[in-house]
Image (cartoon, rainbow, N blue to C red):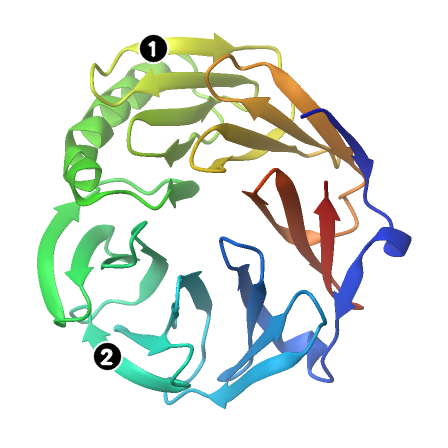
């Protein structure tokens, strides 16, 4: 797979709503068939990507929605102003489960690979693991530190529990770096079941084994790094740069597979990969934009 693609208004589809200015958050399903978005204060809308048909339109009981994620037949929504998260079955079009996370507001939500577990991070930096079908809280982990970016990449339960030790190691190294360089940039971490990707000081990428805690590979002199994450069952990862480009890498070799350009006119960029098709979902004043790169 080799990619060289420029994002333009002529090679995308647009999902536009009258309340476009109230768009808060959105997501795309793993198989790229459905897109869901939340609009202020509590509207949830879903489209089919193949024909742009709006098949889902409900009003949530949870006000001031701020977060949404999707996995298989489930979507989850949360609010920065609430300690409750709500899980819905897409086919039933109704709210089925409410989970209350103490008295602290939600900052991050995501499902596990098999959509059996739900992960939440609250404003007190507590990562909680739920078996949401049973409305049961399985475990809590204190992350102890705020990261500017923290991506839980559809982890298994075992990896999530290992996360605490990993975080301790990163926190200690961060403190050492701050002693050496008081101008340290933010550090972003993206995790899968076996590997950890981290951005250090905005120009270096490290690939670390979660099993051995050792550095496997690193790539330097990548100035202007903005965002990083795994896609396609962790076979690839992508980097978003501040200059408006996306680079796609093969995880095992760190070889560059392609470049996607001209993203600087868009915000909140989501990248996914399914059957070697890359989907890019982004937003501007004229609506949600979807590009499919084959």
- Provide residue 178's location: percent of width, then percent of height: 36, 19
Point 27% across, 40% down: residue: 145
Residue found at x 18% / y 55%: 129
Q: Nearer the viewer, residue 236 or 176?
A: 236
Q: Which of 204/249 is in front?
A: 249
10 Å neighbourhood of mark 2: few (<14), some, or many (≥20)?
Answer: some
Q: Is residue 78 above or below residue 292?
A: below
Q: Which residue is mark 2?
A: 98
Tell whether 276 sits left or right of 155: right
**Helix, strand or loop for disc 1:** strand
Spatial CA span between label 2 and label 1 = 40 Å
Categorize mark 1 by other alpha carbons within 10 Å: few (<14), some (14-19), many (20+). some
Q: Position of residue 55 (x, y in %)?
A: 58, 82
Is any part of residue 82 visible from this angle? no
Seen in the picture, residue 240 relative to 55 is either above or below; the reply is: above
Quadrant containing the C terminus is top right
Residue at point 51% right, 84% down? 41
Residue 280's place in the image compared with 290, above or below, is: above
Q: Which residue in the structure is indicated by mark 1?
A: 215
| Image quarter hosting the N terminus | top right
SS state under label 2: strand
Q: Residue at x 74, y 60 (%)?
A: 289
């Amino acid at each position: 797979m080799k990619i060289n693609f420029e994002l333009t208004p002529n090679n995308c589809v647009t999902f536009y709503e009258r309340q476009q200015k109230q768009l808060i958050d959105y997501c795309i399903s793993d198989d790229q068939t459905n897109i869901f978005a939340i609009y202020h204060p509590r509207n949830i809308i879903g489209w089919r990507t193949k024909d742009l048909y709006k098949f889902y339109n409900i009003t949530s009981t949870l006000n001031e929605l701020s977060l949404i994620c999707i996995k298989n037949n489930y979507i989850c929504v949360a609010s920065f102003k609430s300690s409750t998260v709500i899980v819905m079955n897409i086919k039933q079009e109704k709210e089925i489960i409410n989970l209350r996370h103490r008295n602290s507001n939600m900052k991050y939500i995501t499902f596990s690979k098999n959509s059996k577990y739900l992960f939440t991070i609250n404003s007190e930096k507590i990562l909680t693991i739920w078996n949401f079908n049973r409305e049961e809280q399985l475990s809590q982990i204190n992350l102890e530190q705020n990261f500017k970016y923290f991506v839980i990449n559809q982890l298994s339960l075992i990896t999530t529990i290992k996360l605490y030790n990993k975080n301790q190691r990163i926190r200690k190294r961060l403190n050492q770096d701050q002693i050496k360089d008081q101008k340290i940039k933010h550090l972003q971490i993206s995790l899968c079941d076996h590997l950890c990707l981290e951005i250090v000081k905005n120009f270096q990428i490290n690939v670390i084994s979660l099993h051995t805690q050792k550095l496997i590979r690193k790539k330097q002199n990548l100035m202007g790094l903005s965002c990083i994450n795994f896609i396609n069952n962790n076979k690839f990862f992508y980097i978003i740069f501040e200059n408006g480009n996306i680079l796609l890498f093969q995880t095992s070799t760190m070889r560059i597979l392609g470049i996607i350009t001209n993203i600087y006119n868009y915000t909140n960029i989501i990248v996914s990969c399914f059957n070697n098709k890359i989907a890019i979902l982004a937003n501007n004043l004229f609506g949600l934009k979807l590009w499919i790169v084959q």
